[in-house]
Amino acid sequence: MLQIKNLHVEIDGKKILNGLNLTINPGEVHAIMGPNGAGKSTLSYVLAGRDDYEVTEGEILLNGKNVLEMEPEQRAAAGMFLAFQYPVEIPGVQMTNFLKTAMNSIRKQRGEAEIDALDFLKLLKARQKELGVSDEMIKRAVNVGFSGGEKKRNEVLQMAMLEPQIAILDETDSGLDIDALKVVADGVNKLRAADRSFLVITHYQRLLDYIVPDFVHVLAKGRIVKSGGKELAHELEASGYAEFIDEAA
Amino acid sequence: MTVQTLIKDIPSPKLEKWKFSNLPGAVKNLELTPGVAAWDMTGAFDYLDPSLRWEPPKTAEPSLWTLNADQPADTLALRFPKGRKIDHPIHLTLEGRPGELTTSRLKIVVEEGADVTIVEHHKGLETYWKNGATEISVGANARLRHYRIMEDDPFAVNTQAVNVTVRRDGAYECFTLTTGAKFSRAETHARLLGENATASLSGLTLLEAKQFSDTTVLIEHEAPHCPSNQFFKTLLKDQSRGVFQGKIHVHQVAQKTDGYQLSNNLLLSPLAEMNVKPELEIYADDVKCSHGTTTGALDETPLFYLRSRGLTEKDARQLLIEAFLGDVSAKITDDDVREDIEARMRLWLG
């Protein structure tokens, strides 16, 4: 489904990713762990198509299509979704309007008809219920006045509405207390499906107790230095990242 | 004849109040002849009162008021009698005609307890200069809602000065939508003369091409316990220029003043320019006054966020622009007028 081949990325002339390789098959959940500054957030932004990064080498394929040639909105239409580490506040844009506009924008790009207003509301109600998102939250402007936990829950709500093929969760656990973490993880787990893959980016192993990955990779100094099963996360929790920082250097 | 031979002492940027606005430059070489202001009125006839006297303020230095006084003009005077509640808005339209310098005088007296809504429309054809002066008095416990839709021709000049006094428990609400004119300046001087008199001044200015528009406001708190509110937004495309000068002047007697001023401006082009001068002048010691101003381009981060959810760049920009504009029209308390102004706003945005 998603193939990242020999990816090299710079920002302002500084090398962040140095030959990153990763293949994610349908239905798989991959976790990327790594120390601060390893390039975790860069990877998520490059996948979603943020401007500031320069890809100097390598390629990213989504279902065989070259992602790097696509605009961010085209990537969304192709089934990519990034749950932001720091969800953005958008004053004046109301949640329902935002969700509906996003869904219809994707449908339009795919040549599909707009969603019926009633069907949309039904779907939204159902997703809200699953994720414990209140009506009051839905009436507010996007992320404005949301607590940290509400913002992350809102990311998962958007994911549930847009039903991506590959969802990237960038530090979705940061700033969450354990209750909020469980709600968010439950939401993600409900979306796990044979045709949907996840890339979970995290600094801590804690999230992976709730979203259990099929594969764990260690990202250090801009490339993947070790891969393994879910037990690797526990090893990392015990030993820390020190050995990888030295190894990669 | 050229404007220079017709009018002396056009206020120039040498004056502090005009430092950002080059009116002499804007009217230079215009060939104009004096014309008579012919207001088109709906719902106003019952309230015409020619006995009301025109009593403009005397200003020491050149101003829109001195320009207005130097030219012959009729006064359109309206008196809304004590306690009268007028259900339907009164519409006043002033059309600029090609090649004319139109000097207009409008006098509005809202007597104690009366309640009226006036919608002023400005439009016109080709090159002209409308210099208008408006005197308003809002009596005790009276309310005037004054809405202005400035849709002048893109070659026109429109300068408007408004003086308002508000008595005890009276309320003056003004919203101005400006989309027209090559050069425009809307000056408002509001004086709150009795306890709990209120002034709410707000507006939206939408500029493109090489348009220039200046909003200048002075609110004087001359009695205790008066709230005042200023909320202005400007959206600037292309090489347009905007100016906002807003001042709250709190006299010593005006304890418990609650003054608020906000100016938000969005630059949609690297060549657009906004000049903002917020001022507070406070002589009382127990007051609450705040002001804020922002000027900037659309933020890239929300733009990327929206695009990552599937919105095209164009749609994402449009949504953020609408969001920026969104809350200013909420200041219009008359529902029909608000809808009308919002429709005009959407039309402009395209």
Image (spheres, coloured by chain):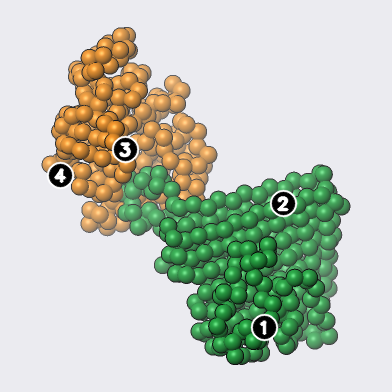
User: Please, what is the three-letter code of the amino acid marked with disc 2?
Assistant: Leu
Chain letter, disc 4 residue: A
Local crowd at mark 3 within 10 Å, few (<14), some, or many (≥20)?
A: few
Q: Nearer the viewer, mark 4 or mark 2?
A: 2
Q: Secondary structure at mark 2?
A: strand
Label 2 belongs to which residue?
Answer: B280
Given residues A246 and B106, the one toward you in this image is A246
Mark 4 vs mark 2, CA separation in Å: 59 Å
Chain letter, disc 2 residue: B
Report which colour depicts chain A: orange
Expressed as whole percent of the image width and height from the top left, the position of residue B101 reads: 62, 85
- Label placed on residue B166: none
Of all residues, the one furthest to the left in this rendering is: A64
Mark 4 vs mark 3, CA separation in Å: 27 Å
Label 3 belongs to which residue?
Answer: A12
Q: Secondary structure at mark 3?
A: loop
User: Please, what is the three-letter code of the amino acid marked with disc 1?
Assistant: Ile
Label 4 belongs to which residue?
Answer: A65
Q: Nearer the viewer, mark 2 or mark 1?
A: 1
Label 1 belongs to which residue?
Answer: B7
Chain letter, disc 3 residue: A
Q: Residue at x 16, y 32 (%)?
A: A6
Expressed as whole percent of the image width and height from the top left, the position of residue A115 reads: 32, 54
Chain letter, disc 1 residue: B
Looking at the colours in the rendered structure, which chain would you say is drawn in green? B
Instruction: Tell which circle, 4 or 3, labels the residue nearer the N-terminal end.
Output: 3
Q: Secondary structure at mark 1?
A: loop
| 2 and 1 marks in contact (CB < 8 Å) | no
Expressed as whole percent of the image width and height from the top left, the position of residue A233 reads: 28, 16
